[in-house]
Amino acid sequence: PDYASFKSYHTYAVPGMKEAAEKGEDVPISLFDEQTYPDSEPQWGMAIDLNSCFGCGVCVIACQSENNIPVIGKKEVNRGREMHWIRTDRYYVGEDADEPMTAHQPV
C-alpha cells in the first residue's frame, strides 16, 4: 500500500464522516495536498543542540509545520484527523547524573 497517502493508509471507518457527509458538510480527508514520494517511504529527523535550549518549543512548532502535521480540534478528530505528540526529552551529561549543573541563560 501507499503509506504516504492518507487516503489509502486509513481504510477503517472514521466516526462522524458519514453523518457529516449526510449533512452536506465539507469532509476533507487532509488539510494538505496528497504527497507522493519516490521509491522509499519518507523519513524525517531533526537534531537540536540542547546545550543552547531554554525550552521555548520553537523546534516542536518547526517540526509540525515542516511535516504538515494537521491542526487538531474536536471537529477535526471527528473527521478522521489524527493527533500527533512531539516530545522534547532532556539528557544530562556529567559526573553525577542525579545533580545536573544548572546555568542561568539570560534572554
Image (cartoon, rainbow, N blue to C red):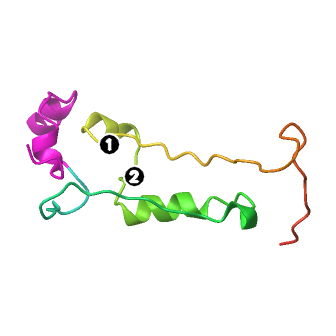
Assign the N terminus to one quadrant of the image.
top left
For the record, the magenta segment spans 1-29
Name the quadrant containing residue 78.
Answer: top left
User: How far from the left and from the top, in percent, is residue 98?
Assistant: 87, 36
Name the residue at 91% across, 60% down.
103
Residue for badge 2: 71
Question: In the image, is 89 to the left or to the right of 54?
Answer: left
Residue 76: mark: 1
94 in magenta:
no
The answer to which of marks 2 and 1 sits earlier in the sequence is: 2
Mark 2 packing: few (<14 Cα in 10 Å), some, or many (20+)?
some
Disc 2 versus disc 1: distance between alpha carbons? 8 Å
Assign the C terminus to one quadrant of the image.
bottom right
Instruction: Report the front residue among 55 and 81.
Output: 55
Q: Secondary structure at mark 1?
A: helix
Residue sitting farthest toward the front? 95
Name the quadrant containing residue 20.
Answer: top left
Does the residue at mark 2 contact the one at mark 1 (Cβ under 8 Å)?
Answer: yes
Q: Indicate the amino acid at tag 1.
A: Glu
